[in-house]
Amino acid sequence: VLHSADISYVKWDMNRSISDWYTQTLPADRQGEMPHRYVLGLYALLERLTAAFPEVLFEGCSGGGGRFDAGMLYYCPQIWCSDDTDARERTKIQYGTSFFYPVSAVGSHVSTVPNHQTGRITPFETRAVTAMAGSFGYELDLNLLSDAEKQAVTEQIQQFKAYGPLIHNGRYYRLTNPMTDAEAIWAFAAQDGSEILVQGMIFHAEANTLRHQVKLRGLCAEKQYRLDGTEQVYTGAALMAGGVLLPKAWGDYTPVSMHFTEV
C-alpha cells in the first residue's frame, strides 16, 4: 500500500489492548515473556517500515495498546494523545502529557460539538486554541460547517502556520494548573526571548468579578513587548512580575490567545 501512492502520513491506531494473552510458541513457565516480545516485535516492524519509507510520518496512538512510551517516539514522533477531544478535558490531558513529552509529539484536533464523549459544547475558537498546543488538525465534516465556521477554519490554519515554529520549537510554560485553577493558561516563548504566545481558556464566566491575571515567563526583563493588534507596550519585567490581564470571560470556556513581540 505504501508503495502504491504518494503517501506521507499513516495513523497507526492501537485500539485493542493485549488481554488474555497466551502464545503456543513458549512453554508455560515462559508465558510472561509474551507482552515484552510483542513490543520488541512491534519495534522491529516499525524499524523496517521507517527505514523503507523515511518520508512517511507515522502517528502512534496512546489508546488500547498504550503505545505512548518513549521508545515508540523513535518511530512515531507524533502520537494521538487521546480520543477524548473535548477542549475542557484536553487542557488536563495535555497538561499532564507535557511533563513527559514535547508539545510537537501531541496529536490534537478540533472536533465537532456536542463532543462525542462528554456532550459538552465549547466555542469553536476555544477548541482551536486548545488543539494548537500540539499537532493541530480537524476531525469533523467540513461540509456541515457554516460559512462563518469555514472562514474561522481558514483563519485558524493561517494562525497555526504563523505560530507553529514558536509552538513546536519555543520554550513551553505552564502558567496555571487546570486541575485546580479557574483557567488553563500556557505559553510558548522564543528561545531568544523575542516573542511569546499566551493561550488557553477561562473555564466559567462569573458576574461582577475581577479579571484574572497571569505572570509570564521566558522573556527578557529589560526588553519591551507589544501586544499584537494594540498599541500596548510592556517591559519584560512587568509582564513577568506583574503579569498580564486575561480577557473578560463571556460565557463558559472563553478562549485566550495573546501574542507579544519584541519592540
Image: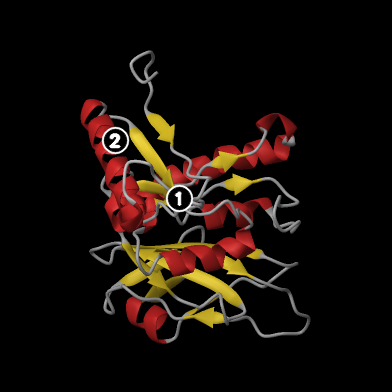
Q: Quadrant of residue 188?
A: bottom left
Q: Is residue 262 at least partly visible in the picture?
A: no
Q: Nearer the viewer, residue 10 or 45?
A: 45
- Packing grade of label 1 (10 A; few <14, some 14-19, many >=20) is few
Vertical placement of residue 185 versus 238, above or below: above
Q: Residue 223: where, in percent of width, then height?
A: 28, 73
Residue at (40% x, 18% y) in the render: 1
Quadrant location of the C terminus in the rendered image: bottom left
Location of residue 235 by image quarter: bottom left
- Counting the numbered discs, the total is 2
Estimate the x, y position of residue 39 in percent, counting from the top left: 32, 48
Residue 88: quadrant of the picture = bottom right
Question: Which circle marks residue 45 in the picture?
Answer: 2
Q: Does any portion of residue 138 appear in the rendered image? A: yes
| Residue 150 at x, y percent in the picture | 66, 36
Q: Tell me: residue 69, above or below residue 254.
A: above
Q: Nearer the viewer, residue 188 or 239?
A: 188
Q: Are marks 2 and 1 in contact (CB under 8 Å)?
A: no
Q: Position of residue 48 (x, y in %)?
A: 24, 31
Q: What amino acid is found at the position of numbered circle 2 in the picture?
A: Leu
The secondary element bearing badge 2 is classed as helix
Q: Which residue is mark 1?
A: 21
Image position of 70 (left or right of 178): left
Numbered mark located on residue 91 in the image: none
Question: Please, which residue is most extreme toward the top here?
Answer: 4
Q: Left or right: 70 with respect to 201? A: left
